[in-house]
Every structure is written in structure tokens, then in C-alpha cells.
Image: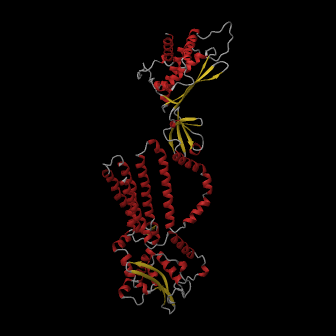
Amino acid sequence: MNRQLQFCCLIFSIILSVIQPSYAATQPPTIKDIAETEQKIETLVAGENSSKIDYKPGKTPLSTLLAIREAAINKDWIEAGKYIDMRYVSKEIQDIGAGELIRQLSIVWNQQNTIDLASASNEEAGHNNDNLPTYRDLLGVIETSHGKVSVYLQRVPDKNGSKIWKISNATVKHIPVLWNEFGYSEKIEELASYLPEFKLINMNNWQFVSFVILIIGAWFFTSILKRIAPFIFRETEGNGPVFVHFFGQSMRMFLFFMIIDYGSHYLGLSLNAKVWIASGTLKYFAVAYLLLGCIELFTSLYLAKIDKNSAAIIRPIMTTFKIITVIFMLLSWFESAGYNIATILTGLGIGSLAIALAAQKTLENVFGAFTLYIAKPIKPGDFCKFGNVIGTVEEIGLRSTRIRKLNRSVVHVPNSVFSSKELENYAEIDRRHYNRQFRFRLDTSSDQLRQLLIRLRDLLLVHERVLPTAARARFEEIERDAFVVVVNCYVDTKSIVAFKAVAEDLNLYILDIIIDLGIEWAIPQQQVLMGRAASTNENLAVEAKANMDALREENKLPFPDFSDDDVTERTNTLGYPREGTLQGKKSLDIGKLAVGDIYDEAVEELDAGRT
């Protein structure tokens, strides 16, 4: 238990260490923000609201940004360099060249920002309410290790003596410093020149190639964990394969995504690519794999402690927890992407009404499975009767319960039906009920019936497998064609097989008693008697009367029940199985039970009195 608690704490700390930084740092633009910005840019570029936009390059801040954007798309950095202010900058910066400077600024800018063209002013004077000089507009801010660097647009004179909007020289002087921190090395630039020019998922050619190499390297590196896990847990008794699977699969995938997430930060990705790859998406994948693996791990550890019959319902519950985990992680990702979860859930609540109605039966079956597991009217392995179906429960799934019938065919009963109707569980029987009716001919004398009842009650009293609860033998009915004697008792066994054996033993004892007393069965029939009908053996009837008279004279007739002394003396004195069988026990002679002993004692006392 202590090891499991320590392991839970370790997993919880890992998850916190993964998730916490995303909340501690300043939140970057989300996927939703980027998508909305791109949509605005496409709207402006496509010419929507074109009557309000002056596309003359440099006349307004917006026209300058559109001109730089178009030149950057065409890789025409010389043209884009016309829109940076090179006045009053150092010779070292001028030697770099305007085209190279605007290229470097574009790369650094794209790593942290996007240009929101919709917020750029389309007036020649720019924004007048931004607390900046009238000739300057703020484009954005770049975060560096030394502080923030503001990127300004500034209205400066051009060669023709008019005014034009350009990247401010106050920003240009910081470009070399920004490039040293966020730019690409010479080797990277050289690699990019050798590769074909392309751009995939907002990544340049060398970035995409490096990202693929990072994925392959992370996959092979984490495969080491899968190989060493069997050696680490080889001495773990019983649960070794469970931990090997967890560390070889779930923990490996967790490390795989975390390595990719960590390595992608060194690729200098643009913000458009970063929001999809390096801004939490990979972490959500990593945490999801880890949580799903933990669910499987603890489920396997729990299943190892319980019986196999209870395992059938645990796996559907595990699947349900996995589904809930995936939904939770998906909603969390949507929230981090900038989407309002309340809006999503509201949309799902309205839009999923039809789905809920369509899945009504499925949900009923799922809740039925939980009802069966919590209430536990049955469990796998129980023998039960449901309607006309009799068999053994093999599995309780999320949708249905599987029953193996006596003829070995399989019936699948929906859980919603199975949990809502009458169910008879034979496995819960604590004792087996023995109840038999015996019908005797109407010419049987009352003393014969008394002697029979005494012998039957004595049998129930002395038999060691018969419980005293509700053990009785009664003369209950006088019908038109028979006397009815009912024998009722409970046998101390749950097994139907053992009960059949005890019932057989009781039946044979009862048959011996009936034959010994010479009582005839009442056979249902209709017949025409020509002459006198056969009657009961008169000698046995006379003997029965003599026995009963002797008991009456001594007031020892055991009706309606035996005396307490007789019960104490004779209880469980008849062994089971009976003497003479392979497993037999030596016990009383059933032919001399009760009536014979009592009769002999009564006769001896009468003779002594006469003497």
C-alpha cells in the first residue's frame, strides 16, 4: 500500500510539473486568437471592405504592413527593405543591409507575434489616442532576456519630400541584438539553402526536416525504456508484467511527447506553428497517455487481488474512466486553445439532444451495468434464472450480460432489462429445500398413519444433514382418493449436486419405512371392481394398532411432536452417507427407529406392572 501511495504521489507530481508552467508564464496568443487574426488578414487582403483601404504603399500604417507582407511572401526582401528607416543608425547596422535587416526582424517577430492588420490604422496620421507622438505607432513588443523591445512604425520624409510610414530606426538599432538571441546560426542558414524551398504546417524547410528528425530520435530514444523495463521489474512478484507494460507503453509515450515538446522550442518556430506544436498540445497528449496508463495500471493491480468472476465488470468501468479522461483532456485543450468551454458544452447540450435520444438504450444499458455492479444481485459465475433463461453468468459488460445456458448455448441479455426485472439467483441459496407429498390409500388405518408420521419425524430428527428449521412430517389432506402426508425440511448445503444426493438418501429411507409398515400407495386410477377390493395387510394393521395402544396406555404417543428428551437424545444420530456405502457411517437401524424402541419400552413397563 505504501509503495502504491508513493507511486501515486510521483505520478501526480509529474502531471503538476507538466501542467503548471503553462499557467505560471504569461499566456501567449491562443489557437483561436491566431485563427481569428488570420481570418481578418485574409478578409483585408481579399479586398473585402476595399473601399475603406488605401493600398498606396507607405501612405498609411496599414498600407506599409500590407506592402511588407506581400514582399515577404514573395521572398523579395530588397523590396521589403524599402520600408525600414535606416537614418541615424550605426555603420555596422547599415552594412548588414535593409533587406537582410527586415528579413531578420520578420523571423524574430513571427516567433512571438502576428501582425493584426485589422488593428493597424488606415489613416495617414496613424493612431492619435495611443499616448505616442503623432508620427509614431506601436506595432508590437518582442520579449527578450534583457527586457522588452518595442517595434514602432514611424512616419518619416521620403526622397520626394512627402511623408511615408516605415519601421522606426529606434527599432532597427535593436535588430542585431534580437537576431543574436532568436535568430538562426550560419550552419542553419547554410542547411536551409541546400534544401528545396518549401513550407509545411507553418514551418520552413529546415524546421520541418529537423522536426521529423526530432520525432524519429525521440521514438528510438524512448524505446530504451521499453527494453530495460523487463530487467528493472524482473524481481517484482506477480505484478511485474503490469509495471513492464506501464513503463514500456504509457511512460514511454509520455516521455516521447515531452521530448518533442522540449526540442521544438529550439527550432525557432513561428507563432503560427508554435501554437499548434509547442504551446501545450504535445503536453496534453503526454498527460493523456500517462493518465490512461495509470488507469490501466491500477485496474490491473486491483484485478490481481480479486477473484476472476468480479473482473468482468471492472474492465467496463475502466473503459468508462478512460472515456471520461479523454473528454476531460479534450475540453481542457479547447480551453487552452482559447475557446469557451461553457459555449462548447451549451452547443453540445443542444446539439447532442438527438444523439442522447438515439443513445438512450445504450445509456440505459451502461447504467444497468453500474446497477448490477453496485447492487450485486448477481456476479460472474452465479447460476441464475431470468425469465425463461436458466444458466451461468459469464460476463457483465457495458451493454449486456452474457449467460451460458444448460445446453451450452449463449444468451446476451441487455443490462437495462436484466437489472429491472425479476431475477432468481440460485448461487445465493444458503440451504436447499426438501418438500415431498406422499399419497396413501384410503383403507390405511389411522394407527398406521400415526406410526408412519412418528417414523418420518424421527428420520428428520436423526439425519445429520437435515436442519431443524421447519423440519416436519404432517398428515395434511384427506382427498377423495388418498391420504396426503407432507414431508418438509431444509438440507444444510448450497450445492444442488449435494442436495440431490441427500434428497435421494431421504427418499430411500422414506421408501424403506413405508414398505416396512406395509402401507400402500394411492395410485390415481379409475377401475370397476368385480367383487371385494384388495385391502391393506391385516396383520400389519393389527401390529400397528397394538403399537399405538401400548403408547397410549403409557401416555408416550409422540404427537404432535417428540418430547424434548427424545429430541436431545436422537438428534443427528443417523449418519450420512448411510452405512454400507463407500463413504458410509455406522448409525442406527432405520427399521427400528422410534416406534420400535418406544413400543418395547412400553411393553416392558406394562409387564413389570402386572407382575
Residue extending farthest to the bottom is 161
Q: Where's residue 191, x and y in %? A: 36, 70
Above or below for 155 versus 437: below
Return the residue nearer the eye: 587 or 426. Answer: 587
Return the residue nearer the eye: 305 or 276. Answer: 305
Return the residue nearer the eye: 333 or 594. Answer: 594
Q: Where's residue 595, x and y in %? A: 52, 17
Return the residue nearer the eye: 3 or 45. Answer: 3
Query: Which residue is at 68% across, 6% downward?
Result: 531
Query: Which residue is at 48% across, 72% downward?
Result: 29
Q: Is residue 204 visible?
A: no
Q: Where's residue 409, x and y in %? A: 53, 34
Q: Where's residue 78, x and y in %? A: 44, 81
Q: Is residue 370 visible?
A: yes
Above or below for 191 versus 94: above
Asked which quadrant contains residue 50, the reply is bottom right
Q: How is the image coloured?
A: secondary structure
